[in-house]
Amino acid sequence: MSSLRWKTMAMALALSQLCLFTGVEAFLSLFDIIPALPGQPPVSFQQYSGYVTVDEKNQKALFYYFAEAEIDPFSKPLVLWLNGGPGCSSLGVGAFSENGPFRPSGQILVKNEYSWNREANMLYLETPIGVGFSYSTDTSAYVGVNDKITARDNLVFLQKWFVKFPQYRNRSLYITGESYAGHYVPQLAQLMLQFNKKQNLFNLKGVALGNPVLEFATDFNSRAEYFWSHGLISDSTYKMFTSVCNYSRYVNEYFRGSVSSICSRVMSQVGRETSRFVDKYDVTLDVCISSVFAQPKVLSPQQVGESIDVCVEDETVNYLNRRDVQMALHARLVGVNRWEVCSNILDYERLDVEIPTISIVGELIKAGIPVLVYSGDQDSVIPLTGSRTLVQGLAEKLGLKTTVPYRVWFEGKQVGGWTQVYGNVLSFATIRGASHEAPFSQPERSLVLFKAFLDSRPLPEAF
Ligand SMILES: *[C@@H]1O[C@H](CO)[C@@H](O)[C@H](O)[C@H]1NC(C)=O
Ligand SMILES: *[C@@H]1O[C@H](CO)[C@@H](O)[C@H](O)[C@H]1NC(C)=O
C-alpha cells in the first residue's frame, strides 16, 4: 500500500513540475489519492482523503474523505455531508455506516449498493477540530469550540479544498447532514451566501437536513409524546414529562450544571421506564448488548447529548484504528491514541444547542436555496413530529403555500414515507422504518429521497 502511495506522490511531483506554468494547485489532489482501502472490493471510482489546514497559526487541520461518483463524476454535483454530535465523525458515521460506498465487516469492506456516490461526488468532513483525525497542535484550541468557530472553519476548509480540487470549484454544491448538523449546515450555508457577495465561489444549490436540531425546545420536547405513543413510558409519566419537568427544561438545567430535584426525579422515572436496552435512535431496533455495558458514558445520563448510537459503530472503530487503514487514508493521530466515533477531547460549547437555526433556514429559502428536512420515523431523539411542526411553522411564516399536499411516497412498491412540499422550495419527508441515522437502517429509501432532492423533483407518487 505505502509503495503505491509513494508512486502516486512521485507521479504527482513529476506532473506538477511539468505544469509549473499552468497552475501547480491543480495537481495537489493527487497527493490525496487513495489507490485502494485495505480490504475493499474493486471499484471504478476514485477516492481521496487527507488534510486541509484551516488555521496556520494554531495548526488546525481538518480531515476529509472524498468518494467521487461511481459513474461520470464530471456531470454530477458535489455534496458535502456532515454528522452532528457535536463532536461525532462524518467519516465513521456518515461514510462508513450510512451513505458512503463501503461498510466495514470484519477484516474487509463490503460495497454499499445504495451509496450516495451513485448520484453525487460525496465529500465527508470530520469537523470541528478534535473530531476523528482532525486536530489542532494547540490543544487549548479544543476548549470552547462553538457553532461560530465551526462554521467559519468549515467555510475556510471548502475554500482551500477547492484549491486542491479546482475542477469542483464551480460545481453544483449541496450541503447535507444530520442531527446536530441542523446547526452546522444552515450556519455554513449562510456564511457561503455572505461570502458569495464578495466573491462568487460557492454554487450552492440546496440543503438537506436529516433528523436535525433546528429549534431546541420544539425538537427536544417532542420526545415525550414519542416515548408515550410508542409505549416507552406510562400515561402518568407522560403527564409528568410534559407538565412537571419537560425535556428542554431538564437539558437546560443539565448543561448549566444545576439539575433541580424535581427534574431529576422525573428523568429517573422516564429513564427507568424507557430502559437503556432500547435504542433511542431507533425504538424498533435491537441494541448491541456489549456496547450498552461498555459505554455507560455515552448512554447516561438520560441520553442528553445527540451522541451517536454506539451499536452501529464497533466494526468502524476497529477498521479505522488499523495502522494500514490509517496509512491508506493519509491520516494521522495527533494528540490522541485512537480514532473515536465521537470526540473525547473536544470541549464544545454545549449551550449553543439552544441557538435556533430554523430562522437561518428561512433566510436560505428567501435567498432561493431549496431546503429538505427529512426524518427517520423511528427516531425518538429528534422525532419527526418536532421537525414537521417546525417546517410547517416556517412555511406559514414565509407565506409559502402547499405545492405537494401531505401524501405517501414510494420506493419500489412500498411506502417509503410521507412528504409535503411548500412553495416548491421547502420540503418535508419522513423515511418509514428509518432510524436517526436514516441511511444506515433504510439505505434504499434514503437513496430514493436523495436522488429526488438532487433532481429537485417531488418524491415518487406511485409505482
Ligand atoms: C459557474 O456555473 C454557472 C452555472 O451554474 C455559470 O453560469 C458560470 O458562468 C460558471 N462560472 C465559472 C467561473 O465557470
Ligand atoms: C417546558 O418547560 C419550560 C419551563 O418550565 C416552559 O417554559 C415551556 O413552555 C415548556 N415547554 C413545553 C412544550 O411544555
Image (cartoon, rainbow, N blue to C red):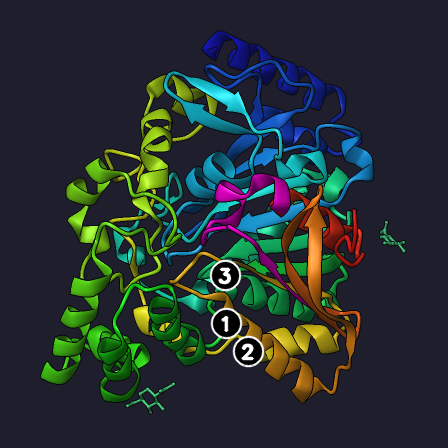
* Residue, disc 2: 389
Q: Nearer the viewer, residue 418 or 187?
A: 418
Q: Residue at x 68, y 24 (%)?
A: 45
Q: Nearer the viewer, residue 143 or 350?
A: 350
Q: Decide: marks 1, 2 in contact (CB < 8 A)?
A: yes
* 431 in magenta: yes
Q: Residue at x 65, y 51 (%)?
A: 415
Q: Decide: marks 2, 3 in contact (CB < 8 A)?
A: no
**Disc 2 residue type?**
Thr
* Residue, disc 1: 385
Q: Is residue 55 visible?
A: no
Label 3 secondary element: loop
Say above or below: 149 vs 162. below
**Disc 1 residue type?**
Thr
* 336 in magenta: no
Task: State the image quarter where residue 117 is shown.
Answer: top right
Residue 357 image position (x, y, % from top left): 52, 75
What's drawn in magenta, residue-wise?
A: 427-445
* Residue, disc 3: 211
User: What separation in Å lies between label 2 and label 3 (alpha carbons)?
Assistant: 13 Å
**Disc 3 residue type?**
Asn
Going by the image, does 275 lie left or right of 39?
Answer: left
